[in-house]
Amino acid sequence: MCGIVGYIGKQKASSIMLEGLKRLEYRGYDSAGLAVLQNDGVTVIKKIGRVDNLSAHAAKQKLSGHVGISHTRWATHGGVTDANAHPHVSSDGKIVLVHNGVIENYVAIKKFLLTKGYDFESETDTEVLCNLIAYHYAKEPENGEGTRLLDSVRKTLSHVEGTYGIAVVCTERPDEMVAARKGSPLILGVGDHEHIIASDVSAIISRTQNVVYLKDGELVHIAKGGFTISTLDLTDVSPVIDTVTWSVDDAELGDHDHYMLKEIFEQPAALENAMRGRFSADGSTANFGGLNLTAADFRQIDRFVFTSCGTGWHACLVAEHLIERYARIPVEVDYASEFRYRNAPLDRDALFFVISQSGETIDTLAALREAKRKGYKCMAICNVVGSTIARESDGGIYQHAGPEIGVASTKAFTSQLMISAMFALYVARMRDMSFADGVDYVNALKQVPAKVTRILQQADAIADIARRYAKYNDFLFLGRLSLFPIALEGALKLKEISYIHAEGYPAAEMKHGPIALISEECPSVFLVPKGELFNKVVSSMQEIKARKGRIIAIILEGCELPEGLADDVITIPDCHDAALPILATVPVQLLSYHIAVARGCDVDKPRNLAKSVTVE
């Protein structure tokens, strides 16, 4: 969601911060701002709209300072206005702050500060936090250690309830910066005589690939060319500097019109990366080095619980189908946002899996912590090395999909499906799957990247279909078994980027209510399986056709529909059932993308959405 970039070094801070904010645009935001410490104080510029608007106004100012903080805001407390945009300045003009997260007790703090003479110009919880730091700073005496600002921030945070990732500067201490996190990601970039604070590594990598991932409850104090890390309870922390393995080129748009399209076409490579080095020498099973559980441990597990949000939740549903089918172990799938509030009874021998591309999704992180609190082992399927979920889980599987910039997940989702299929194989081979069936399964997965490439070769034809359907405002997506989650995902993608009302259902459930929606103005996208369910799905299609509904059918090679049943047909390569959800996903991604483009939507920055949801 909101993005933070702070800079302290020898270069012009405004240029570096604006570049960083541009790289954070994919996270979703509605306003942007920056503050630069100058010789005569601080210059603050805040504007609603895109970073380009902020850049245009910044270009009119003489921003020569070498220290600054900046922000892209996704509104929570207060509307989308210049006044509510960050950075915020305390009413005494000394403290400047940017903040991600939500301060839950801000109303009580604000009432207290009003009695102390502090004024407020915005509706935000962030300005309350800024003034509370100013209050403690005014009370804090100077000390020989030069930690007055740090001590003020630490005391403030001891009174705060909620989540935060903050960066703070002070006009009286122009060579210092303090940052802290709790529940909202924050990273320190360690460069050549410079340091960068950011909420996402993509804002840092153009300057340095050496980073420190701050943990909850940690504060970093940057001063005199160095930094120290400590906790809220005054414990010193020895920093661990990690190296980012991808470069700025990996996050560039290249020749594509949008990041979403680029990432759709990166899926063959992302799928290869998900598999690389993870099959056994005899080619009959998968291997995972980071699960930190033995084969004997897995044989004791009698239930898996998968939890996630949004697109990741759809991946959980596919994992449920594949694990239950091939490994014969019960799987429960829960919305991460609901899990910790339900207090559901669970088997003691259950193993938890959380799925999060960013590794920072606040609801998924909360579900992970709740499961661990109750004594369960927790695994993570995650794409971001060093993320909070990756660090706090007991083990897991990295996706290695590379940076995903588009808000609507594409390559990360199919990578999650691939890992789910591999994990189902891994457990099944420990149970009762035969060697021969394992070899067939592995060979089928190895063919997936090439088959995805074949589907991508139909992109122009799918774009033509999409343009014919772009005028409609209601869609149904229908599938069965492992294709039902793909129907949900297709509907979500269309909603996210084109703002069309779309719903996903099991195909057989269509006649139990949703059929009331069918008309010439409500097309249906059918994901048609082979085998015993083929004729069942065809019957559902005929029910829609009888009511004059238009149909787009996604079918496997070798399957033949009755003549005239579908208005448009997209064919995908025949495949093993474990690979089917991956292949069926690609056409619905392309359909959604091209419908959104035809409707003139901002595909990479859909309204109201954020890439990484870090507030509850």
Image: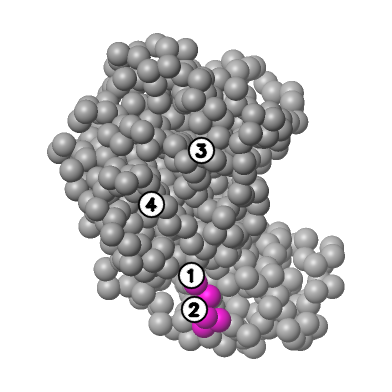
State the residue in front, 471 or 79: 79
Callout 4 secondary element: strand
> Label 1, label 4: how many angstroms apart (C-alpha)?
33 Å
Q: In this view, does 102 lie above or below 252?
A: above
**With 253 as the anchor, is 421 left or right in this view?**
right
Segment tinted magenta in the rendering: 597-605
Question: Whole-percent x and y of residue 454?
Answer: 36, 70
Q: Which image quadrant: the C terminus?
A: top right
Judge by depth and name the residue closer to the eye, 473 or 24.
24
Tell me which amino acid carries mark 1. Val
Q: In this view, does 536 lie above or below 176?
A: below
Label 2 vs 3, first from the N-terminus = 3
Alpha carbon distance from label 3 to label 4: 15 Å
Q: How far apart are marks 3 and 1 (CA)?
A: 42 Å
Question: Dot 2: few (<14), some (14–19), or many (≥20) neighbours within 10 Å?
Answer: many
Instruction: Tell me which residue sits at (36%, 59%) in the image.
Output: 22
Gap between marks 2 and 4, in whole Å?
Answer: 39 Å
Disc 3 designates what residue?
92
Earlier-in-chain disc, 2 versus 4:
4
Q: Earlier in the sequence, mark 3 or mark 1?
A: 3
- Look at label 4 and name its amino acid: Thr
Identify the residue shown where x is 52% and y is 63%: 48
Q: Look at mark 4 in the image and give the residue it sits on.
A: 43
Mark 3 or 1, which is nearer the eye? Answer: 3
Q: Mark 2 points at which residue?
A: 597
Cα–Cα span, label 2 and label 3: 48 Å
Mark 1 touches mark 2? (CB < 8 Å): yes
Q: Which of marks 1 and 2 is nearer the N terminus?
A: 2
Instruction: Return the disc, 1 or 4, that comes first in the chain's sequence.
Output: 4
